[in-house]
Image (tube, rainbow, N blue to C red):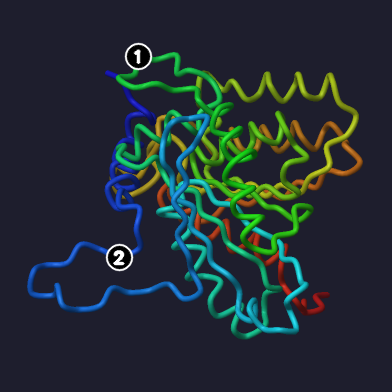
Amino acid sequence: MSRGFPTPLRAALLFFTSVFSVTGFTAETPPAADAAPPFQVERSHVHTLVSRTLGRTYEIYVKLPPGYDKPENAQRKYPAVYLTDGPYTFQVASGMTRVPFNQGTFEDFILVGLSYARGEEPVVSRERDLTPFPDIRDKPYPTGGAAAYLDFIRNEAMPLAESTYRIDPAQRTLAGQSFGGLFGLWVLFTEPALFRNYVLTSASLWYNRRAMFPLEAKFAEQHKDLNANVWFAIGANEHPAPCGRTPKECTDENMVADQAAMVKALRSRRYPNLKVHAKVVEGAYHTTTFPVGLLWAMQDLFLTHRLETK
């Protein structure tokens, strides 16, 4: 049977893609509520981008920080956090940063969400765009399109965002969950200078018999340094059963061990300019790790003041 995730992760994938298959930010409403206005995400914009290279249409979601339009900030450039799986991750990031922005807890930055291809099922779009290699298992749709998708991000999505908004290209962060984490790690080894920071939660390192590990070793053979900050987060329950109340909460693969192995490998290289942060989120599952992991990384990156600890 063809699968995008190990068997017990199918439930997570169905949840992930069904809940977030609509690329807008409003839920479908019953007829009685048709007259009610939709909920609006403040300071947010949606750009439609027809890809010249891919021949597909994507949406780019942008949320600006408070004060972006104030005259005193007219020349200011901002860090940007680019998020794959945007219909899910953009909403999470928008909600969790609202109060820290408004209270001055976080430095201001811009959120940029990358949607699935318009008119496609999310599982089809994400498994093609976010996987670096063709799936060794039979799939009813193409996989292994990460290189083409990265070209789209670099040559079309980023220029749109960074010519429209005051984004500092030297302060880009890439954040991704699951296949998005796999994609982010592949970008780190393929074009590391494109982003300064990488937030990789529940990265699917099991993909294609752990193909990212030979890629990491090859990178190490060819490079003396890796100039990046990387945050890894994994749910404590992302390992084979028994792991929770029901089998649906478990995974076929030991993703906790996979993350630990990748972190160990990267730290063993002793790259002068690589900083690796790793966290196991207690009690979390594949479908619940991203918000905690993202907030943890955002605090490290953008906290405006820190309490002294003894």
Q: Give coordinates of residue 285: x percent, y percent.
A: 43, 49
In the depicted structure, whether residue 74 falls above or below residue 77? below
Looking at the image, residue 214 sits to the left or right of residue 119; the answer is: right
> Which residue position holds label 1?
138
Which quarter of the figure has residue 295?
A: bottom right
At 34% across and 43% down in the image, what residue appears? 12
In the image shown, does 254 or 20 lie closer to the viewer?
20
**In the rendered image, the vertical position of residue 82 relative to residue 10, given as above or below:** below
Residue 15, horizontal then vertical, whole percent: 30, 47
What residue is at 38 percent from the left and 74 percent from the top?
Answer: 40
Quadrant where the C terminus sits is bottom right
Q: Which mark is residue 27?
A: none
Q: Nearer the viewer, residue 55 or 68?
A: 55
- Residue 147 horizontal/vertical position (percent): 58, 26
Residue on which the image places disc 2: 26
| Cα distance in 3D space between marks 2 and 1 | 35 Å
Q: Amino acid at mark 2?
A: Thr
Three-letter amino acid code at the position of disc 1: Asp
Sequence-wise first label, 2 or 1: 2
What residue sits 51% from the left and 48% below the top? 236
Q: Is residue 237 left or right of residue 27?
A: right
Classify mark 2: residues with Cα within 10 Å, few (<14), some (14-19) or many (20+). Answer: few
Residue lying furthest left in this view?
Answer: 32
